[in-house]
Each structure stands twice: as C-alpha cells, then as structure tokens.
Image (cartoon, rainbow, N blue to C red):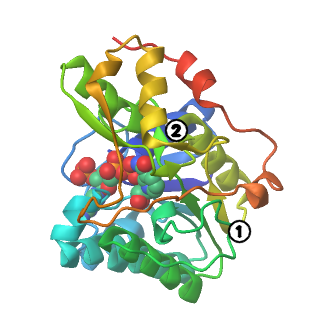
Amino acid sequence: MKKILITGVSGFVGYRFYELLSEKNDFELYGFFNKTKVNLKNTFSIDIKKRSEVIKFLKEISPDIIVHTAALTSTTYCEKNPEEAWLTNTLATKYFTEYAKNNSSYLLFISTDLVFDGEKGWYVEEDKTNPINVYGETKKEAEDLIFQISPRFSILRSSLIYGKSWCENRGADEKIINYLVEGKKIKLFMDEFRTFLFIEDLVKIMAYFCEKEIEGLFHVGGPEKMSRYEFGKRVAEKFNLDLSLIEPASIKGYNSKPKRVPDGSLSTKKLKSVIPFSFTKLDDALSTYERN
Ligand SMILES: NC(=O)c1ccc[n+]([C@@H]2O[C@H](COP(=O)([O-])OP(=O)(O)OC[C@H]3O[C@@H](n4cnc5c(N)ncnc54)[C@H](OP(=O)(O)O)[C@@H]3O)[C@@H](O)[C@H]2O)c1
C-alpha cells in the first residue's frame, strides 16, 4: 500500500482530505500539523520552516506521495509578516520538492487563484501570473520552485473554498455564517469575483490525482462565477440568516492592504479533460449539509 504524507493536516483542506482518504482505505496515511493538534492517526507536530525537522520526518516516513497543503493562508497576516510567509509558503515548499525529487515521490501542491492580479478573470493555465500581495507572491514563487526542481508533480491552483470544516470556521461560507449568527454586520464586495469551490469537489479531485499520479498545472474552481456579496447573500438565504446584516461594498477606492484581486475566476477546461466528474453548484452544495 502506498504511503501518503499530507502537510497541513490540521487545516481546512488537509483535514478533509485525510478523512476522505481514510474512508477509501487505499493508502497508508501520515500527516503534519504545526500548532493545532488533531486526533488523526500517524500525525505529527512539526515546523515546516525548519529543514532539519522536515527531512528527519520525511526519512522516517518515506512517503511515495507528498500532498503539500500547509501554508500561512491569511493574506492579512502574510502582508504584515512577509519573511515568515516566505519561509513557510515558499522555502518550506522547496524542502518537500527536493525530497520528492531525490526519492522519486509524486508531489501534489495546492496553490491559489491569487497568483493572478485579477484584471482579466476566467484565467487559464497559460495566463501570465502577476501576484499583487505577499501571500500570492509567496505561492507563485513556490510554484516556480516546483517547476524548476520537480520532475513529477502536479499543482492545483484553487479558487476560494467553502463547505464544512472540522473546526467550523475555515470555509468561506462558515466565516460569513459565524458573523451573521452572532448578529454582527459584515461588508462584502459586489465587485470582487471568484469561482467559489466546494471543499468536497476539491478533495475528490486531489484523491483522483493521487490515485492516477496525474502531472501538470491545473486550475480548480467552482462552476459559477459570483461576487463575494452574491455568495454571502445566497449562503444567508439558504440558512435563513439575517440578510440585512450584509452590507454591499465596493473595492473601488477601498485602500486595502493587502491589495484585493478583483476577478480571480479560474477556467477549469483543462482539468475537465482529465477528471471523470463534474463540479457542484453552490445551491446544491449548501443543500448537502446542515447548520446548527
Ligand atoms: N482555503 C482557501 O480558500 C484556499 C484557496 C486557495 C488556495 N488555498 C491553499 O490551499 C492550502 C490549504 O489551505 P487551508 O485553507 O486548508 O489552510 P488552513 O486551514 O489555514 O491550514 C493551514 C495549515 O498549514 C499548517 N501550517 C502553517 N504553518 C505551518 C508551519 N510552520 N509548520 C507546519 N504546518 C504549518 C497549519 O498548521 P496549524 O494549524 O497546526 O498551525 C494548518 O494545518 C494552502 O496551501 C492554501 O494556500 C486555500
């Protein structure tokens, strides 16, 4: 049975991916987390910024497949802590990539739509990257390292992800729901567009990639492009939450740091040519789970 190591196993994507694979029982599973201990078998706390720790654990586990999801994912935190963001998101990726190369492991890396500046939208894989914030820059540099070093990899560039997370605060929908449930107002941009992606679709695709060891760069986004405001409204409607707490806003004239990507929508034409399933629409996805 092949061994898979999942980094970021305490995160939104890593945890759900581990769960899905443990239901399938096709792989021997291992995971790395950092500060958030999770109750999953064969998972270890490490700091991926420390090369010696990474290499020590990798040698002990000797994975056939490395699924690298760990990252500093808050764009605001990355903007304020650029060096830590670079060490975590870029340099640590190099450690995993070099190990994968030297040990003939297959590497699956999760990247982001924020490698683009958002001026065009419906990005295809051939489009030029041009990150406009620190988080996007660190992920783009990580991608570049993988292209340079790794002979056997895939990079899945993901849109903004929603759905149930184990800690109930990671999904793009959960963040909005938590605000509204507490009776707090939330501003959502009407002119910031994403192809919101259902977590269940993403982990299913990741599992398929690991089974087939598919190689290359692919965009993974949901089937509908919508603004953050529309997304929030549809989530609130679905769960009968107070719509009046959602304030429509515009990114024009909004002097934000980190800079906002206006249209990060991703085209999945290339991905659809290699996967045998379709993407879930927002309303269908929201109907598959309950909220307290
Ligand atoms: N969520 C999205 O909407 C989205 C969209 C596009 C792309 N992505 C990409 O998808 C991947 C997964 O995102 P996510 O939403 O699952 O992230 P997340 O929930 O923020 O989880 C991040 C994970 O990285 C781990 N981590 C951070 N620093 C670490 C360090 N120094 N050493 C070891 N582990 C460390 C965290 O561990 P602890 O919790 O234990 O500290 C956690 O397990 C990321 O690469 C992200 O760039 C996410």
Looking at the picture, tell me which residue is in the foreground, 24 or 11: 11
Q: Name the amino acid type tagged 2.
A: Ile
**Residue 23 locus on image (x, y percent):** 57, 30
Q: Mark 1 packing: few (<14 Cα in 10 Å), some, or many (20+)?
A: some
Which residue is labeled 1 in the image?
A: 215
> Looking at the figure, which quarter contains the C terminus?
top left
The answer to whether any part of residue 250 appears in the image is yes
**Residue 228 locus on image (x, y percent):** 43, 42
- Give the structural element (helix, strand or loop) at label 2: helix
| Rendered image quadrant of residue 217 | bottom right
Looking at the image, tell me whether mark 2 or mark 1 is earlier in sequence order. 2
User: Which corner quadrant of the figure contains ligand 1?
Assistant: bottom left
- Give the structural element (helix, strand or loop) at label 1: loop
The answer to whether any part of residue 112 appears in the image is no
> Looking at the rendered structure, which numbered label has been put on residue 199?
2
**Residue 280 locus on image (x, y percent):** 66, 32
Q: Name the amino acid type tagged 1.
A: Glu
On screen, residue 225 above or below 144: above
What residue do we see at 25% from left, 34% from top?
186
